[in-house]
Amino acid sequence: MSSDFELLIPIQQWLYREARLLDSRRFDLWLGLLDESIRYRIPNRALVRQAHAKDFSTWSVERELDGADSLALIDDDLAALRYRVGRLQSGMAWAETPPSMSRRLVSNVMIDSVREGCVSVVSTIFLAKSRNDGRVLFTAERRDKLAPIGADFRLRERYVVLDDAVLAADNLSLLF
Amino acid sequence: MNSQPSVPLDRERYVARDGSWVMPIIFSDPTLYEIEKQRIFGRSWLLLGHESQLPRPGSFLRSWMGEESVLVTRDRNGKIRAHLNACRHRGYQLCQEDRGTGQRFQCRYHGWTYDSDGSLAAVPGEESIYYREIDKPKWGLVPVPRLDTFRGLIFGNFDPDACSLEDYLGDMAWYLDIVLDRCAGGTELLGPQRWRIAANWKVVAENHCGDEYHVGFAHGSVFPNLAANRATPIPYAREIRPAMGHGLGANVFPDEMPPEEWLKAGLGEFPPPVYDYMLRIYDETLRRLGKQRAHISLIHGAVWPNFGMVPIVNSFRVIQPRGVNEVEMWSYSLVDREAPAEVKAWFAAQSARTFGPAGSFEQDDAGNWTAVTRSSCGFESRKHRLNLQMGLGHEERSDRFPGELGLTASEINQRGFYLRWMRDMFDGETRDE
Ligand code: FES
Ligand SMILES: [Fe+2]
């Protein structure tokens, strides 16, 4: 417990720094935070019935999320993320040229477990984006695995649970 | 606006006789949209889903036909059914879930309960407060009058007098089979991803149907070298109009060209397991459909009115209208059902990375469609014709495959799309109730 608590401050600072890099559009530097073996996934979500309506203990968000064998919103490895980010500075990625204005609020940071130095951390993110046609708001839970590199960390896994079955946005041009 | 809108009789006002221009007002006029609900979405074959989404008796999904919520079920006997998702008591949207399994649907308002075949099974208070006077067989869910499947895809049509699905697809079916019937195992749909775009449905659908022209510019971020070369037609690629309203673009590779060569002409390289799989599928396609079709690779297309596709990355989508200036995109990845898991996963990731809401293409497309729709709302800007003349008068035919052909790029398919719109909107008038 106490060791988790000592980890919490550097983990929080890492997540805040990451959010600031993305808000300030330093996607190139953001790529530097990623582990070689990263898997970045945003599953598709649907409105479904819980198996046992009368038993909270069986209710789960997982039931609403498409499994790994289905179509995700994003399912990227490092090469795909590099491509995704690189495209944004082609000068012709019109949805982000000029760039949208964005702000990420990262909150509710909790360390789930630490295994062989690899930290599983859950956080919530509130992403606001505004461009020509007004403002879009997203909220999500992020389930991350951060691998230690000396005193720093690299993102090895990110699983984003968006709070939408139908996105109230015309694209997902930004990363969570 | 009265409850029975009518189109001003001046047919010349919206679309040129030869399809060479359209008026932007058709993207923003609420009266025209009301008529579209009746004469287009009320009379066309519309995609509801895929048999693979209803694996067993009791499986259900909630879908749409135009702005009508539709409940699609597999009943106790395994038969696929589609009904308006509206309780017959007060019209409450009966099913409030995207998909699931269950033999009974109980309305949340007053508790009328329907069976998966649509029949009314139970009414609370049937004896005590209805005096046993309710004639339950008369109050089942309203069925979608025409339901049919094509290679696993489920289509519905609200028009009891509509032509058969087969006739409706016409020569488009010959092309669709290149992806739907290329292997014995058939296909399945993964997804859908769903998102909202502030665009008129036609702006989105015509793009799928025929707009190869935008690819080099709107998607310049994906093809940095193509943008400069747009004046040159793309070798092997053709725009094809199998029938008015449907359209597609395809690479048509010469018979003598080995598949090893043209399989690399897709979007990016296939990793080894996928490449090997595609070679196997080529052999199977050759056996099932013949050389002519084994050498055609579909790029994009649309079945009239709102079933769009980008088969080059396995993306299939329904452009669900949500009012005159909004759509809800339902985007699926269509994969061979019996493909190895890693091959399916690669195709799904490819669909998502290109034509999902976070895709390298799709991200930028939404902006095109919202900007066109937005312009069409202005009093002044919507009065001026938009140009659709590219390739007009240069349509060709080939003895190798059905339909009319244009270069890539050509606006042959968009002209077909808007002429079909005119035909459905105006010639349909006499059939209004
Ligand atoms: S509206 Fe369904 S039971 Fe009353
Ligand atoms: Fe596009």
Image (tube, helix red, strand yellow):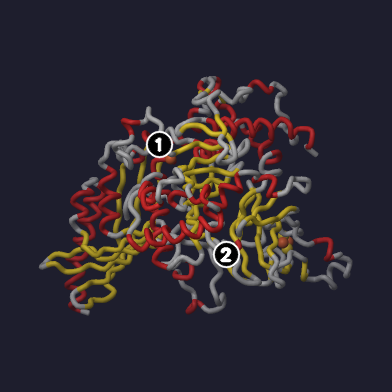
Q: Which residue is mark 2?
A: B52
Q: Quadrant of the N terminus of chain B?
A: top right
At a point 62% along the width and 38% down the height, the residue shown is: B243
Real-space CA distance between mark 1 and mark 2, rounded to the nearest whole angstrom:
36 Å
Residue B348 horizontal/vertical position (percent): 42, 58
Residue type, label 2: Ser
* Labels 1 and 2 touching (C-beta < 8 A): no
At a point 88% along the width and 70% down the height, the residue shown is: B132
- State left or right for residue B340 relative to residue B48: left
Q: Which residue is mark 1?
A: B235
Front residue (pair B242, A73):
B242
Q: Quadrant of the C terminus of chain B?
A: top right
Q: Residues within 10 Å of mark 2 (few under 14, many from 20)?
A: some
| Residue B134 found in image quarter | bottom right
For mark 1, name the chain. B
Q: Nearer the viewer, mark 1 or mark 2?
A: 1
Assign a secondary structure to mark 1: loop
Q: Residues within 10 Å of mark 1 (few under 14, many from 20)?
A: few
In the figure, B400 relative to B127: above or below?
Answer: above
